[in-house]
Image: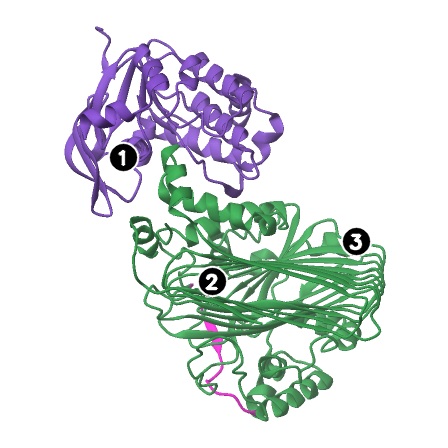
Amino acid sequence: MSKDNQNTPDGKSDNEKIINNVTDNEYKYGFVTDIDTDVIPRGLSEEVVRLISAKKQEPQWLLEFRLKAYRHWLTLKMPKWAHLDIPPIDYQAISYYAAPRKKEGPKSLDEVDPELIDTFNKLGIPLNEQKALSGMAVDAVMDSVSVKTTHKEKLAELGVIFCSFSEAVKDYPDLVRKYLGSVVSYRDNFFAALNSAVFSDGSFVYIPKGVRCPMELSTYFRINAAGTGQFERTLIVADDDAYVSYLEGCTAPMRDENQLHAAIVEIVVEDRAEVKYSTVQNWYSGDKDGNGGVYNFVTKRGLCRGDYSKLSWTQVETGSAITWKYPSCVLQGEGSVGEFYSVAVTKNYQQADTGTKMIHVGRNSRSTIVSKGISAGHSQNSYRGLVKVAPKADGCRNYTQCDSLLLSSTCGAHTFPYIDVLNDTAIVEHEATTSKISEDQVFYCNQRGIPTEEAIGLIVNGYAKEVMNKLPMEFAVEAQKLLQITLEGSVG
Amino acid sequence: MDNKILLDVKNLHASIDGKEILKGINLQVREGEVHAIMGPNGSGKSTLSMVLAGAPGYSVTEGSATFHGKELLELSPEDRSHEGLFLSFQYPVEIPGVSMVNFMRAAVNEKRKYFNEAPLSASDFLKLMRQKRAVVELDNKLASRSVNEGFSGGEKKRNEIFQMAVLEPSLSILDETDSGLDIDALRIVAGGVNKLKNEKNATIVITHYQRLLDYIKPDFVHVLYKGRIVMTGGPELALELEEKGYDWIKESND
């Protein structure tokens, strides 16, 4: 089942010209921080894997994990099944480790390089706890390492662990060893194997039994160094009856070259626990002619292991030249719940192939998928989703709604839903729509005094509202603005 | 008749897809006046309203229109709105996911921006909404729903007049506002229009039928036929048309 909408570039209306008058708006996070960076030579080999592990002073078991992953990766080929035109990537031309040089791991903010603090301030992420949003703890990751995690002590009082992955390996090796690779095996796919071999840093979250994490936890990922890839890894564990809301934001400098980002997010949700994972992905998407931009290949998966556990993914994807990403839920627990709410915006020559997998294993598990694609310019935007119900999973339900909004006559929107139901009691619904912003809607707004750009913003935000409403408040406002700015000059 | 001229349309020609629809319209509207434009289907009534409001797809090939002394046809549709032109649409569009509150706040604040005024505070704005809702007896719930989405025909038209009440235009063009309305809805909509009428603003009522004019009393009635105003009279002309139909006009103008 696949439904394609490919318009021809004929019969442009005035409004369309406005839409097609594609974005020359500045990517405001495109600056480069001039900082002394420790970059290892380009190329990938067993020595490089060992070097990364040594630089991070890792235990033997983790080195073994990396090496196994690396050797497995060597046997794999890049996946070709996505609706993406991916130029060949030379994995030997990338540096796999870049870290801002620092003295012995900064303990207080005074020891963090002011350039770094300044960088994150510019990105709207104050690392100074007095200035930081009181309701949010932030782990700031620049290139391959975590720069600073705020509010750590306050969280520790509740037994909540929120720290960089490297610290977790040092301080909580048993926890990390227990869960690392338990949801996304290094054998899972090409990029998961690559990440498992060379991952540098990321965030680690553990919410103990019965604890409701009192603040939003957030990791902010920043690529800075040139010629490097970013391979971070996030591991979140919510023990029985725990709750956490976690946010992830990403930006990168504007560069002519393409940068590779291959991340893994693993989430484990135990009995009656709930995890909300929200992403606002705004990696540099390349210029209007399609030069540069981040290649974003991400494996995100959560295991709802406990009965009545719940995992909710919300993503607003506006950046990256290429996005390949399917945040998924394995609904193993009885009555467990998986949700996926997504807005994916593509413009210029961006390509996105994104969606989710809902794997129903537990009885009476439920899932909801709401995907809103918005395509402009010459972009290609695909939804790809799998709903699978295992033979013994009685009484499962899935509802999928998959909408595409086209803002130009040269873009493409595609839907690839896969439904694999092996149990007769399952109820699976799929709805899909494709629409364009009509000239009539824009004129109606114009007539009421709302100029076209604002009208588009309003209409697009209205279209995406169901998903935006799922974002935490602080993020929702930002995301709305982002949506509006992203589409500036590209609508009609 | 010494009131100031609001709108002055001179020899207006307009076409759509290369086909000429308006073939030399002349129309003067002064403050405080109500003009009715009647005519058979396809005579150009809706085209006239769309051209005046600046809808895309129509091209003006000849003639001019001034509004408050400014060249109307050179203004963007949103600036025409800010200058005080309001069009009540024959078929108001739905905008899913955009609440009426958000929509109207954007509209009101864009207008204020145009006049270099600060945006209305949330509480002032909500107060304004409440006040204006009363004009057309619009339900609070309706105002929190998405723009026109799932509204009945009558609700859509009431919603148009509600927006008119909020934006306080100096010239309102009501395009077939009576179509699809039952008699109660018609009374409410017409009542709203009458409440908003004063000596400074003017209304152009486009309609097929005399019925609406029982409620909104016109000062002038124009008959539009084949892209020209072929006859102008007082309210009695509407009654005459109701009685005799358009055939006698067609005959004398074909």
Residue A103 location in percent, x, y?
56, 69
Mark 1 vs mark 2: tell me if same chain: no
Chain of the residue under label 1: B
Of B108 and B253, nearer the camera is: B253
Identified at 59% across, 33% down, the residue is B144
Give me the disc on residue A157. 3
Q: Which residues fall within the magenta stretch?
A: A33-45
Colour assigned to chain A in the rendering is green
Give the dominant element type of the magenta stretch: helix, strand or loop: loop
Residue B92 location in percent, x, y?
45, 36
Element type where label 3 sits in the image: loop
Colour assigned to chain B in the rendering is purple
Quarter of the image containing the N terminus of chain A? Answer: bottom right
Q: Tell me, yes or no, if residue A340 can be seen here.
A: no
Of A462 and A28, nearer the camera is: A462
Give me the disc on residue B2. none
Residue B238 location in percent, x, y?
33, 16
Q: In the image, what residue type sits under mark 3?
A: Glu
Which of pointers 1 and 2 indicates the residue nearer the eye?
1
Q: Which residue is mark 1?
A: B51
Give me the disc on residue A319. 2
Judge whether residue A270 is colored magenta: no
**Dot 2 crowding, Cα within 10 Å, few <14, some 14–19, many 20+:** many
